[in-house]
Image (tube, helix red, strand yellow):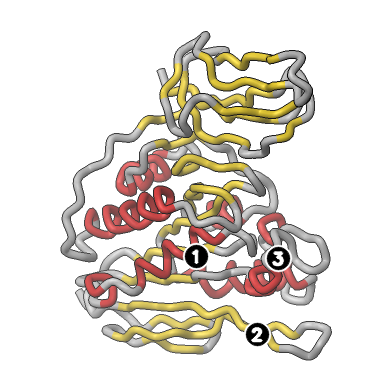
Amino acid sequence: MAQKTITINGQKIEPGQSKTVILNSYELHTKTKIEIPVHVIHSKEKGPSVLLCAGMHGEETNGIEIIRKIISRDEVENLKCGTLVAIPVINVVSFLYGSRDLPDGRDLNRCFPGTKSGSLGSRIAYDLMKHIVPIIDFGFDFHTGGAKINNYPQLRCVFDFPDNVALAERFSTSLIIDSTYRDGTFRKEASKKGKPILVYEGGESMRFDYLAINEGVNGCLRLMRSYDMIDFDLPHNPSVKIKKDTWIRANCSGLFHMNANNGAHVRKGDLLGVICNPFGEAEDKIVSPTNGYIVGINNQPVVNQGDALIHLGIDEE
């Protein structure tokens, strides 16, 4: 069945056409115009309309690289069916500064659903909800850990919604984590419109993590292959479902040394790391409080008592 023409903010993309359009233009205080490019590959044959977006926070570079790699592949440029809507950098302003927040200090991913005449973040959120969400069936929003927080490649979705879990299983990354909606986020507001958005987390900010990048690329290819959008076979990647999680915190201040690998399965009582006094007087051992998987680690070498060090996920029973 042939597809119909789609429109993004008055810009038409015909069936069989690949086109880069502008979500909208925003003026900064310097009179500089900031535009958000949207790359659309709209095949002739009907199929799912998939959103891949990244750069919600300006310092999260791994997702930007994942989408760059995806849209430059021959099999993706020539989709057999369906539509790919790719936004490599949503938050162009923060990307220019290499910062997480917008110039006014707001987090763009707390500005949804946004308003047409609100703050810069609110207007960007409004345009995504108005022009992008109506033309997609589902999407994946790519993120990384924060400063010095390295997340093992993982998908976050809501286990209570079967469509979320089904999409995660098609993407098939190593860890699938049950993550409730947060107010003001893109995925919560899109869910209200019946459009599931899953969040991919991998690596840390301002640092390329090639494991996370390759996992993200492979997940996108598996997803599109599962809908016959492309001809590209990848082996299924066994996934572990994480229902609960906890952070292991520092019992004392000092120099933190990690002994276990990110993503590793650990058992209760396993030695995960040590905190050493810089003057050589004492050493505090960090052991796992339960069986689980390391889903994120703090790479900060100097830590204070109470700091979150190791993110531990407990698999679904």
**In the image, residue 307 above or below residue 156:** above
Residue sitting at 42 percent across and 71 percent down?
Answer: 85
Q: Which class describes the residues within 10 Å of circle 1: few (<14), some (14-19), or many (20+)?
A: many
Where's the C terminus, which quadrant?
A: top left
Q: Is residue 18 left or right of residue 145?
A: left
Q: Which mark is residue 100?
A: none
Residue at image x 49%, y 59%? 63
Q: Which structural element holds mark 1?
A: helix
Please say if 2 is above or below 33. Answer: above
Q: Which mark, residue 64?
A: 1
> Which residue lies under the disc numbered 3?
114
Q: What's the residue type where badge 3 is placed? A: Gly
| Residue at 51% across, 48% down | 203
What's the distance in space between the residues labelled 2 and 1, CA to CA? 20 Å
Q: Is residue 231 left or right of residue 257?
A: left
**Mark 1 or mark 3, which is nearer the start of the sequence?**
1
Q: Circle 2 is placed at which residue position?
A: 25
Image location (x, y in percent) of residue 4: 32, 80
Q: Secondary structure at mark 3?
A: loop
